[in-house]
Each structure stands twice: as structure tokens, then as C-alpha cells.
Image (cartoon, rainbow, N blue to C red):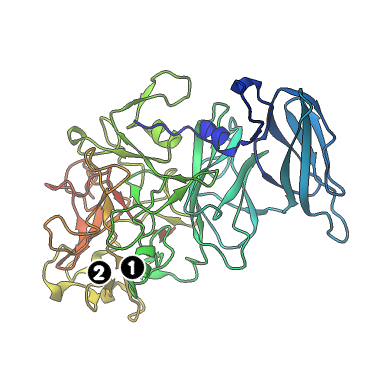
Amino acid sequence: MTNFHIKTALLAAATLALALTGCKKDEEYAFLSLDTASMDFEWGQTKEVGFTARQIASYGTPTVPTGWTCTRSGNKFVITAPMQSADGTNMKGKIKVTAKSKDDTELSREISVAIKIAREIAAGANSIIVSRPGDRFKFYARRRGNESSGTSLAAATGGALVWATSKTVVFNVSLEGDHLFFSTANTTELEEGNAVVAVTDSNGVVMWSWHIWVTTFDPAAEPDHLGGSVVMSRNLGALANSNATPAEAALSYGLYYQWGRKDPFVGPAVWNSNVPRALYNVSGNYTTHHYNVSSDEVDTDGDGKTDNVAGSLEFATAYPNNFIAGLESNDFDWLDGGHNTGAWSPASKTLHDPCPAGWRVAPPTIWDGFTATGASSTDPAGFGVEGDYAYGWTFKPDAQLPDQSVRVFFPAAGRRSFSPTLAKPEDNYTNVVNDADGVGHPKGFYWSALHPLHSPTGIDEPGGGASLVFRNDYVNPAATRGATEEYAPAGGFPLRCVAE
């Protein structure tokens, strides 16, 4: 069982070290390191950067850009940005700190500093869309998800990058006061991608996390209409929605979600592949998702003692990077020993809903127009589709659409496996390369807000229409858990959000 501990990862990844070599024990080397190599500031803002030193006899006066100050206080350097100037000068530069070792050798480190005024985002959701390159953002980070007010995260003391799909798509994550700050790549054109950022407690354990969707896509400007609902025209986290080429199809997969969890997982790197898309940690090094079985005993509060199991809401919150495989004894739910049928709701947005502000997980009726009867069909004449099966179906559910010309592509993105034997970092995508029967046609799976073991009548039983499932030779807009395990709650499916 792999534990993902943010504080440990941050300290290990962010340390920039300079050591003198020689025939000495490690503790005898002169050593100076800073906890980060770059920092962004508001005008006049003061921040601290920690440092680690060994075998140091004295410290020099830091060299700073005009208007900036830097002083040492214990094991921290205190940096203050200049007040705003009329001509906008002194907005960036490098601060150099120096020290002399006990054998009179000089050591130095630099930190890049810059004025970058953050744009405030009214978050109010577990997913945040940003669309500006080279910019800095902030959002109020003392409340969870769609909580309208409050300070449920008042005890948070730090900010962290959990993972990102590139080294620069999201970086410089920090908790400052009541706001979580982050920056996007400093490029002319937007570097699109996804990331997960978090706030942590004093032990470095994640208290809550948010998905950052960096995209030029504006869901409100390009919606579809299905089953009387306004629906996003691409999957949550997708960077395209097209079957023009294999590459476009792969970008259209978006992110994958276990039923009832707010945190996303990436999909395959390319179409028709089981190789996962690359992920990067706070230091820009390659990382991957971690895996647990729901019954694993874990330490969720960081005190070194087992206090929970992986299949709990507390663990899922504290370890947003861990995919949790289910057990057959619990219907392959990622929860251990029970089901939370209300984690997502067909009626309204919930605390753990993964969609952006103004959007929520789809109710189970929006796909009814994908077949002539609203039920499963193996008769192509009864499919509400246009054209051939090309990386998925282009649906045209005319009976449900106010605009008869609207067409919507749903990629056959497969799913992430729910079982302990298949849920692993490599080769864990089911029905992406081939269907289980070897026909060679990938499947599409899409969650609704109805739990797979919850019926539309409100009775807990196998048989609820919880998901859309399709292949080249059938379409089921009301797939049930029933006798098959395919639609188990621990499975990772894409999502198509609907407007609130």
C-alpha cells in the first residue's frame, strides 16, 4: 500500500541543495539550501522562505533587486516586495543569499521573485476552470466544495500541488492567509491541461483538494442539450471533443472518476493504449497515481498509527491521488463495508460533486434519447446516432433536442478497473484497447449521479440506471449494476456535467 504524504513530498522535492564534497562524513559537509527557487508576490507583500544550513560560520547580507528587502530570521529569510511604483519597475529579479562555512568557503543560493497580482476566482466548487496563460490566481480556501460560506478548513496551514499533467501547467501553489494561490505557464498561448491542488494541515495531510482545469473551453458558451438539460459539450477535464483523429479522440477522454468521489484520475496517454498519461509532482518529476484496496489499514492523520481503512471517506479526502479498488464482498465499491448512495445526487449538487461552479453530475435520464425506446438496444436502427462508430458515437437524440441540428460526440474512453487484480499503475484501463470479448471495439462508460446499487424508486438494490454504456453494436442509456460487475462503484468513468 502506497501512502501519498504531501508534506514529505514537498520537503523532498522542493529542497535545492548545494554541498561541498570531500572525504568527510555527510554531517561534516557545509550545506545551504532553500525550500523553493521562485516566489510570486503582491505589491508590498511579505513572505518567508525556509532554509536548511550545516557547518555555517556566518551569513552575508542578501543581494536584492531595487525596492525589495530580505533579512534572515532564524531558519527563514523574510522577503518583502516593493510598494507599487508609478512606472511598474522592480517587478521581478533575483535575490542572492550567501554564507561562509567554517572552513571559510562561500556558499550561495538564488531565489527568483516577481510581482504577479492574483486574479480572484469565486470557486464554490471542487473543479475550477482557468483560461489565461502566464497568470496568477487565488480562491478562498477555508471552505470545502460547494459550501456557500464558513470556515470548515480553518485549520489548514499549507498549500500543495498533488499532481499536474505537465511541469508548468499549474505551479507555485501556496496557501496565503485565507486563499490558495497558483500560477499557469508563462506562455503566449495557453498551455492546456489538468492539475489537483490541495490545502494541508500542520502534519502535511491533505484536508481538501480541488481540480484545476486549464482550458480555452468555455462550457457556458458551447453547451449541448440532452433530455431537457443543458450539458457540457465535452467530458470533464477533456482538452477536445472530436473523433477527427486518434490524437483528438484521446484528448477527448477527459478525466476518470470513481462513483461518489470528487477527485479525478488521468486516462491513457494515447488512443487505444493502456499506458497512463504522464503526471508530474511539485518538483517537476514524473509521478503516477497510487493504488489501494478498500480494506487496507492506513494512517489518515499522519501520527504513525493505523486509524482507518482506505475505503473510507476520510482516506479518500486525505489521499486524492490514490485510486481505491473495491472488493467483491462489497459489490466492488471503493468504500469498505457499505455504500454511500447520497455522495452524488440526481436532484442537486453535493459536497463531493466534481463539476465546476454552475454545473453538477448528470441525472440518469439525460441519455434517454440515445436509443429509440430509452432502453438498451442492439438494433442499429434504434440507435440515436449519426455516422459510423469512430472512436465512439456521435449521438443525435432528435426527440430530446430543441435544436434538431445538434450532434454530440461521446468518446469510447473505456474505464479504469475497479478490481484489486487490475487496479494498478500500468495496464489498468479496461475496454480501451479491446472489449473483453476481443471484438476490438472500445466501450464508452459514463456515470450519472444515481448510485449503481440504487434504484430510481429509492430502494437499494441492483438494477438502478446509473450509467451510459455503449459499443459499436449496442447502446444502453440506462445501464444497471444487475448481474454484471462492469458498473461497479469503484470503476473510474468519465463524466459529462449538466448545468444546475
Q: Which residue is mark 2?
A: 369
Please identify the quadrant where the C terminus is shown: bottom left
Q: Is residue 195 above or below residue 316?
A: below
Q: Position of residue 390 (x, y in %)?
A: 25, 72
Look at the image and tell me whether residue 296 can be seen. yes
| In the displayed structure image, the side of residue 130 where residue 436 appears, left or right | left
Q: Residue furthest bottom?
A: 405
Q: Residues within 10 Å of mark 2 (few under 14, many from 20)?
A: many
Q: Is residue 194 above or below residue 409?
A: above
Please give the name of the residue rendered at 72% of the width and 47% of the height, measured from the top-left corner: 112
Q: Position of residue 206 (x, y in %)?
A: 50, 34
Q: Position of residue 305 (x, y in %)?
A: 42, 18
Residue 373 sits in quarter? bottom left
Q: Nearer the viewer, residue 362 or 468?
A: 468
Residue 371 sits in quarter? bottom left
**Cβ–Cβ under 8 Å for marks 1 and 2:** yes
Please give the name of the residue rendered at 23% of the width and 45% of the height, measured from the top-left corner: 488
The amino acid type, in three-letter code, at marker 2 is Gly
Q: Is residue 468 above or below residue 97?
A: below
Mark 1 / mark 2, whichever is N-terminal: 1
Q: Residues within 10 Å of mark 1 (few under 14, many from 20)?
A: many
Look at the image and tell me whether residue 145 can be seen. no
Q: Which residue is mark 1?
A: 226
Task: Determine the secondary structure under disc 2.
Answer: helix
Q: Residue furthest front?
A: 23
Q: Residue furthest top?
A: 305
Please give the name of the residue rendered at 72% of the width and 54% of the height, measured from the top-left corner: 117
Q: Position of residue 350 (x, y in %)?
A: 42, 45
The residues tagged by marks 1 and 2 sit, at their Cα atoms, a distance apart of 8 Å
